[in-house]
């Protein structure tokens, strides 16, 4: 396990555990429902950047310690607004997470509010327990929501649903979050961890090249409406020289486990 080097484990507010090709980042402030302070935003950015540089990490799981995912930003640090250095560090953390090249999974239970929603929507897949509640609450504080987080929420749930959450600051239950596309799968608290393990196992069985290329191209479509020709050429060239197709077809025909040769770089 790697984490911040200071303090006892209970006082380390962002934990990272690496198990082979899977990294788990845990928000570790359960006494505050994992509300994120400025130091935690900085730690998230540093950890995710390090995981991005580690070619052996294929899947990143993001979760909260205890009964909650994340209750949002630490309001006590926002007396002068979320601008300046705070905004820079917040932006860097969310962008690092959104730009992790492999699949990312948010594992949500309990509160997922404000900055918690920003973290969840920066992930590719969101799995939720049925006890979760969601909300985006800047209207309760007079805050203009950070642009990068707002754009991401709109891309995930659409303009109408985003306006409703932003205008009202109301909390919604997990069933509604599923209906509007804020979460991808919903299950009981008891079933959540097993489903995460199952999904991670499936992801590791599949081609990392396909996943990384697909993520890059899908994100480009979402941002720009299409895949640029140079992006298509980049990934077609990578596929041709990777040996992935040759190995995938050979394993399929021989009815044996596949041994994918490609690693991201």
Image: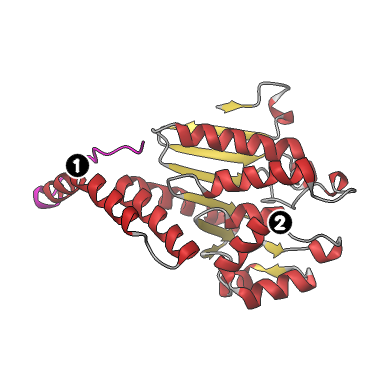
Report if residue 263 lies within the magenta region: yes
**x and y, in percent, of residue 3 in the image:** 61, 28
Instruction: Say whether marks 2 and 1 touch (CB < 8 Å).
Output: no
Q: How many marks?
A: 2
- Quadrant showing the N terminus: top right
**Residue drawn at point x = 42 percent, y = 46 percent:** 102
Which residue is labeled 1 in the image? 241
Which residue is labeled 2 in the image? 146
- Quadrant showing the C terminus: top left
- Kindly state the secondary structure of the residue where label 1 is placed: helix
Quadrant of the rendered image containing residue 88: top right
> Which secondary structure dominates the residues rendered in magenta?
loop
**x and y, in percent, of residue 225 in the image:** 44, 68
- Kindly state the secondary structure of the residue where label 2 is placed: loop
**In the figure, 84 relative to 220: above or below?**
above
> Which stretch appears magenta?
252-265
Residue 209 left/right relative to 76: left
Q: Nearer the viewer, residue 191 or 110?
A: 110
Residue 98 left/right relative to 73: left
**x and y, in percent, of residue 171 in the image:** 75, 68
Label placed on residue 29: none
**Residue drawn at point x = 74 percent, y = 42 percent:** 30
Quadrant of the rendered image containing residue 19: top left
Gap between marks 2 and 1, in whole Å? 41 Å
Q: Which coloring applies here?
A: secondary structure
The residue at the far right in this view is: 79
**Residue drawn at point x = 23 percent, y = 47 percent:** 237
């Amino acid at each position: 396990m790697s984490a911040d080097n200071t303090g006892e484990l209970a006082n380390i507010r962002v934990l990272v555990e690496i198990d082979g090709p899977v990294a788990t980042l845990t928000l570790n402030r359960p006494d505050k429902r994992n509300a994120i302070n400025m130091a935690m935003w900085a730690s998230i950015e540093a950890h995710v950047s390090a995981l991005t540089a580690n070619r052996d990490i294929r899947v990143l799981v993001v979760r909260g310690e205890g009964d909650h995912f994340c209750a949002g930003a630490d309001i006590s640090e926002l007396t002068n607004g979320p601008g300046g250095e705070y905004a820079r560090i917040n932006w860097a953390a969310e962008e690092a997470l959104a730009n992790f090249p492999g699949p990312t999974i948010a594992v949500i239970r309990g509160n997922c509010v404000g900055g918690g929603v920003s973290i969840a929507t920066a992930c590719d897949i969101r799995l939720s327990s049925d006890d979760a509640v969601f909300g985006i609450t800047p209207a309760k504080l007079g805050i203009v929501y950070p642009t990068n987080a707002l754009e991401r929420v709109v891309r995930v749930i659409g303009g109408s649903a985003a306006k409703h959450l932003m205008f009202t600051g109301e909390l919604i239950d997990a069933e509604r979050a599923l209906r509007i596309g804020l979460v991808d799968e919903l299950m009981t608290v008891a079933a959540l961890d097993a489903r995460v393990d199952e999904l991670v196992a499936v992801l590791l069985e599949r081609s990392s090249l396909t996943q990384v290329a697909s993520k890059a191209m899908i994100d480009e479509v979402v941002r720009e409406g299409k895949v640029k020709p140079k992006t298509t050429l980049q990934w077609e060239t990578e596929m041709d020289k990777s040996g992935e197709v040759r190995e995938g077809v050979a394993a399929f025909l021989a009815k044996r486990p596949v041994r994918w040769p490609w690693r991201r770089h």
